[in-house]
Amino acid sequence: KQVAASPKPRRAKLAPKGLSQKCVRGLSYFFASVGCESLIFHCRPVRQRTIALSDLETLQRLKSLCAACSGSFEERLVAAVDALRADYGLRCLSAIKVFVRSATQHWLGRDLHTPSWPLSELEAILDARRRLQAARGNVMIGGCGLLYQCTITEAAELWARIRRAYLEVCASVPGCQVSRRAETLDRAEAAFATHRRRMQELAESRQ
C-alpha cells in the first residue's frame, strides 16, 4: 500500500528590509521604517501588511530622493521632502514620523532615540539632530569602541554632554515627560554598568 507523502511545511515569508511586525493583545501589526544618516523615518503600525509595504515604498523613495540630491545632508533632505510633498501632498508628510538617534552603546548598550516628530516639522527635526551632533562631536565617537578613541574621563564628559542635549531636546517636544526620560536613562545606564566597567578595565590594561 502506497503511503501518501506528507505535505511540505510552508516556508515563512521573508520580510523585506524595513518592514517589521509586532504582536499587541494577540493581534499582528506591521510597520515600515527606514534609516538615513542619524534619522529614522517610520509609519504607524497597521493591521494590513499590504498597507505597511506601501508605506515602506514611500519611505524608500524619500531615502533615494535624499541620496540623489546634491549638497549637505540637510540640503538634500529638504529637497527630498519638497519632492515628496509634490508627489504625495502634505498629508503624507504628517503621516511619516521621524526621530533622531545617537550612538550611545558605550553607556547604554543601545542607541539613544529622541521623541518623534511628523516629517512636516522638518526644522524641529533638524534642530534636534544639530544639538545631538554638537554634543557628541565626532560621528565615530559614542559606540562600543569608544575607549579606543578617548580616555575614560573624556568618555564621562562626553556622556554628560549627550545626556544634557538629549534631555533639552525632549523638553522642546510638547507633552514629553522629561523626568520620565531621565529615569529611563538612569535605569539603562545602571543596567549596563558591569559591561562598561569591564571595557574600562580593558582600556586601563592597554595603557
Image (spheres, rainbow, N blue to C red):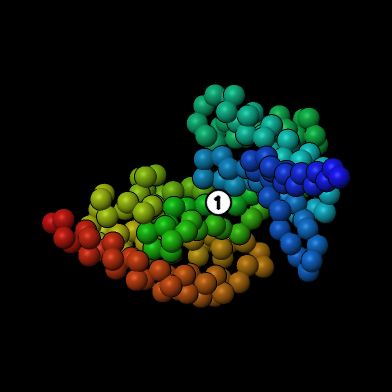
Give the percent coordinates (x, y) of residue 53: 76, 41
Residue situated in front as seen by the camera: 114 or 164: 114
In the rendered view, does 194 fall on the left or right side of 205?
Answer: right
Number of callouts: 1
Q: Is residue 160 above or below residue 133?
A: below
- The residue sitting at 79% across, 66% down in the picture is 26
Q: Which residue is mark 1?
A: 100
Structural crowding at the residue carrying mark 1, measured as other residues with C-alpha within 10 Å and reported as few (<14), some (14–19) or many (≥20): many
Residue 207 or 87: which is nearer the viewer? Answer: 207
Q: Position of residue 172 (x, y in %)?
A: 58, 61
- The image position of residue 142, as x and y in percent, is 38, 53
Q: Residue at x 32, y 51 (%)?
A: 145
Q: Quadrant of residue 205?
A: bottom left
Please state if 159 lies on the left or on the right of 129 as rendered.
Answer: left
| SS label for mark 1 | strand
Residue 82 in view (yes/no): no
Report the residue at 35% width, 66% height from top.
195
Quadrant into which the N terminus falls: top right
Query: Residue at horizontal 56%, vertical 65%?
Result: 171
Amino acid type, label 1: Val
105 or 67, nearer to the observer: 105
Query: Does residue 202 show up?
Result: yes
Q: Quadrant of the C terminus?
A: bottom left
Residue 113 lies left or right of residue 2; in this view the side is: left
Residue farthest along the left direction in this orientation: 207
59 or 11, which is in the foreground?
A: 11
Instruction: List the single residue furthest toward the front.
Output: 1
